[in-house]
């Protein structure tokens, strides 16, 4: 076997020791998304359930509700959406000391949301013909699929409580918009349309 | 650095990350229809006469294209939300003038880029007809009208010999 294939096998193999495979569950809540929702026009409430396999592999389900309500003073455009979203994936603990109190993760996610957009603007005159014109879409159905590459840390504070943060690179995989009105501005769970970076700060409790 | 220190550093990095945002509005926000003159044999024509295009708007007649000469193509505005635009093409040569009326039917739909960008309307041209004083016909080449100003939407065929 080549050295590359050997390294690949080592990455995917669970270390052999006396620690059992199943080590429990953890739930977590993201404070960054909630803070953004409280302080800005968009954000999300997000929670996750993670399975601990041998302190090394962590299959994870993340779910939340993303919301945006923006009334732009300059363009006078109003944008509103609110919808649940779901992500599934897996993290790997990259530290040598797998069973220590702290972890360094890399992971992948697949995300999906189905949401509706309200978009409107007060009537404004056509610049040539001068007739007043309305602009907007109501309850336009959209779907969005994306992938995330995650890098994060997790530090034990005391007892079952951990704190951790993650940085995520997000990439759209597929999307559809009813009526082809253009680009969604905010996608629940993904964030703003033209941003590929995201981050979380998590409160994690082992259960 | 302790893990708690690294955690705080990470939180600060997240704050910096989230404070960055960009506005990506299209460079060209003008949505127009582009016309090109063609001969009956399919070759591009240059109009040696003078062309002025007018339309009727809410406060009266307005010129939307003024005294173009030696042109093979030109662009006209397209209304945001009227089902049909009507233009009068006024041709003026050496000692003569004539006019043709052009009716363009279309479907309009809003186009949204971002809350930071002014709204646009895109259009699908569905039908075109004209009178035949100087014009033989006008045909739709590309029905989709967006902010891509390189696309020619309509071919104009003047009468043979004009």
Image (tube, coloured by chain):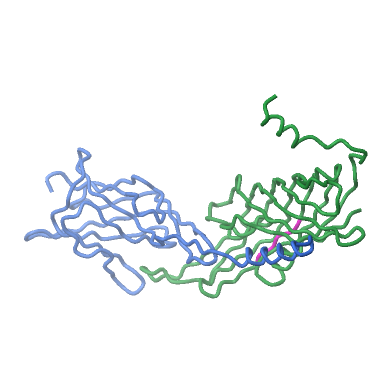
Q: Nearer the viewer, residue B4 or B13?
A: B4
Residue in view at x 58 percent, y 63 percent:
A119
Q: Range of the magenta residues? A: A64-68
Give residue B37's position: percent from left, percent from top. Answer: 23, 48
Residue in view at x 71 percent, y 62 percent:
B10
User: In the image, which lettered chain appears green?
Assistant: A
Residue A13 is left or right of residue A126, and the answer is right
> Number of callouts in the render?
0
Give residue A9's position: percent from left, percent from top. Answer: 74, 32
- Which residue ends up furthest to the left in the rendered image? B95
- Is most of the magenta stretch helix, strand or loop? strand
Q: Nearer the viewer, residue A1 or B48?
A: A1
* The N terminus of chain B: image quadrant: bottom right
Residue A152 is left or right of residue A138, and the answer is right
User: In the image, which lettered chain appears blue?
Assistant: B
Query: Within the image, what quadrant is residue A158 found in?
Result: bottom right
Asked if residue A76 is positioned above or below residue A95 in the image, the reply reads below
- Which residue ends up furthest to the top in the rendered image? A1
Is B78 in the magenta? no
Query: Within the image, what quadrant is residue A96 found in?
Result: top right
Give residue A142's position: percent from left, percent from top. Answer: 62, 52
Asked if residue A113 is positioned above or below residue B56 in the image, the reply reads above
Residue in view at x 68 percent, y 30 percent:
A3
Residue B156 is left or right of residue A82, and the answer is left
Q: Nearer the viewer, residue B67 or A112?
A: A112
Give residue A103's position: percent from left, percent from top. Answer: 79, 52
């Amino acid at each position: 076997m080549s050295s590359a294939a050997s390294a690949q096998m080592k990455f995917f193999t669970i270390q052999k020791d006396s620690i059992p495979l199943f080590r429990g569950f953890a739930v977590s809540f993201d404070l960054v998304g909630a803070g953004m929702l409280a302080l800005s026009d968009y954000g999300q409430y997000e929670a996750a359930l993670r399975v601990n396999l041998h302190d090394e592999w962590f299959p994870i389900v993340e779910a939340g509700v993303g919301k945006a309500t923006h009334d732009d003073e300059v363009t006078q455009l109003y944008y509103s959406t609110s919808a649940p979203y779901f992500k599934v994936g897996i993290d790997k603990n990259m530290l040598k000391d797998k069973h220590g109190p702290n972890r360094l993760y890399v992971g992948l996610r697949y995300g999906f949301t189905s949401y509706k957009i309200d978009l409107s603007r007060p009537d404004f005159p056509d610049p040539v013909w001068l007739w007043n014109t309305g602009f907007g879409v109501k309850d336009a159905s959209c779907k969005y699929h994306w992938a995330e590459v995650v890098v994060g840390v997790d530090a034990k504070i005391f007892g079952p409580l951990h704190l951790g943060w993650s940085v995520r690179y997000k990439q759209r995989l597929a999307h559809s918009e009813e009526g082809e009105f253009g680009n969604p501005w905010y996608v629940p769970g993904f964030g703003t349309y033209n941003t590929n970076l995201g981050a979380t700060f998590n409160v994690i409790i082992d259960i | 650095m302790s893990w708690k220190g690294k955690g705080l550093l990470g939180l600060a990095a997240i704050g910096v990350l989230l404070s960055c945002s960009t506005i990506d509005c299209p460079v060209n926000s003008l949505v127009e229809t582009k016309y090109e003159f063609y001969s009956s044999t399919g070759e591009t024509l240059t109009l040696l006469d003078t062309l002025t295009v007018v339309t009727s708007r809410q406060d009266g007649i307005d010129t939307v294209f003024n005294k173009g000469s030696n042109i093979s193509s030109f662009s006209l505005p397209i209304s945001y939300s009227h089902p049909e635009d009507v233009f009068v093409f006024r041709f003026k040569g050496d000692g003569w003038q004539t006019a043709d009326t052009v009716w363009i039917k279309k479907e309009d739909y809003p186009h949204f880029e971002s809350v930071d960008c002014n709204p646009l309307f895109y259009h699908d041209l569905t039908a075109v007809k004209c009178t035949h004083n100087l014009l033989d016909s006008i045909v739709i080449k590309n029905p989709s009208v967006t902010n891509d100003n390189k696309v020619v939407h309509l071919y104009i065929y003047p009468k043979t010999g004009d």
